[in-house]
Amino acid sequence: MDIKLIAIDLDGTLLNSRKGLSEYNRETLISCIQKGIHIVPCTGRTVDGIPDEVKKIPGIRYAITTNGAVVEDMKENTVIDTRLLSCDLALEILRFVDPYHVMYDPYIDRRGITEARFMDRLSEFVLTPELQNLVHNTRDVYPDIIEFVEMSNKPVEKINLFFGDMEERARLRAELDKRSDILVTSSISNNLEINAMGATKGDGILRLASHLGISPSQTMGIGDGENDFSMILKAGVGVAMKNGSKELIEAADYVTGTNDEDGVASVIRKLVLGMEI
């Protein structure tokens, strides 16, 4: 396959269950980079949330973050393209979700914004120890989230919601899905993620490919979650992890092993590098 850009989800895809990068996956990514193939983290996280063991691999330059809201050049520390929630729309959503029993955090300027009342009760929202550690490292704590967003008067990359009660999650999603001015997806079973229209991983891949002069047919997207659905459909080659959702697997061109089986390395070696697995 003539693949020039491989966009890879992090959680549940490139990273194993311990949120780590295996040596086999790392070596495979380096082999691609040495052949001139762009390796692009494509994640719901902000750029600050991309682990150093991924970000610091020589040759990994571009990233698609917060579900496609931001396409950026990490080497030059510049933003190539954005699809952001306006401050007013973000405030409207935050005020709407506030009465629910939910932990919410907007992402502004590459950082998540939270409050002590959430940070001190992470386990209540069914966050694993690994995810709790990620939250601690990528959120800034302020007395009042809504007041901070209002005072900053800045657009918002994404609003993340964590739930301890899945019935509450279902009720809120049903209400949010009625809106036509936002996109609602999910990356894990107990969260929802709210983005601006046009902020999808699939659209992010196409925008970055256009910036680099790469044909859509020369792109590959690899993922496992609902928020990866767009890139499975829009990339030239869509790959689903075996641990992905049934719907994602059915939509993919190829299915590879789980994130704990180095599925990313396996499919890249077979389809892109022509190497023995």
Image (cartoon, helix red, strand yellow):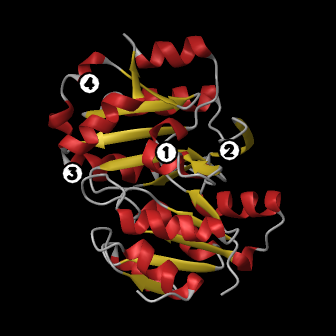
Instruction: Give the residue number, with chain letter if any, for mark 1.
Output: 194
Q: Quadrant of the N terminus?
A: bottom right
For marks 1 and 3, give the CA distance.
Answer: 18 Å
Q: Are marks 4 and 3 in contact (CB under 8 Å)?
A: no
Determine crowd level at label 2: few under 14, some 14-19, many 20+ residues with C-alpha closer than 10 A.
many
Q: For residue 240, which quarter of the picture?
A: bottom left
Look at the numbered disc 2 and give the secondary structure of its residue.
strand
Judge whether residue 127 can be spotted in this image. Answer: no
Q: Is residue 226 left or right of residue 66?
A: left
For marks 2 and 1, give the CA distance.
Answer: 20 Å
Q: Disc 1 marks which amino acid?
A: Ile
Instruction: Give the residue number, with chain letter if any, for mark 2.
Output: 72
Lower position in the chain sequence, tag 2 or tag 1: 2
Q: Judge depth for marks 1 and 4 and give the one in front.
A: 4
Q: Which mark is residue 167?
A: 3
State whether residue 66 is above or below residue 102: below
Along the viewing direction, whichever of 198 and 75 lies nearer the viewer: 75
For marks 4 and 3, give the CA distance.
Answer: 22 Å
Look at the numbered disc 4 and give the secondary structure of its residue.
helix
Q: Disc 4 marks which amino acid?
A: Met
Along the viewing direction, whichever of 173 and 256 lies nearer the viewer: 256
Q: Is residue 144 left or right of residue 166?
A: right
Determine crowd level at label 3: few under 14, some 14-19, many 20+ residues with C-alpha closer than 10 A.
few
For marks 2 and 3, give the CA distance.
Answer: 36 Å
Instruction: Give the residue number, with chain letter if any, for mark 4.
Output: 119
Lower position in the chain sequence, tag 2 or tag 3: 2
Where does residue 73 sit, x and y in percent of width and height?
Answer: 70, 44
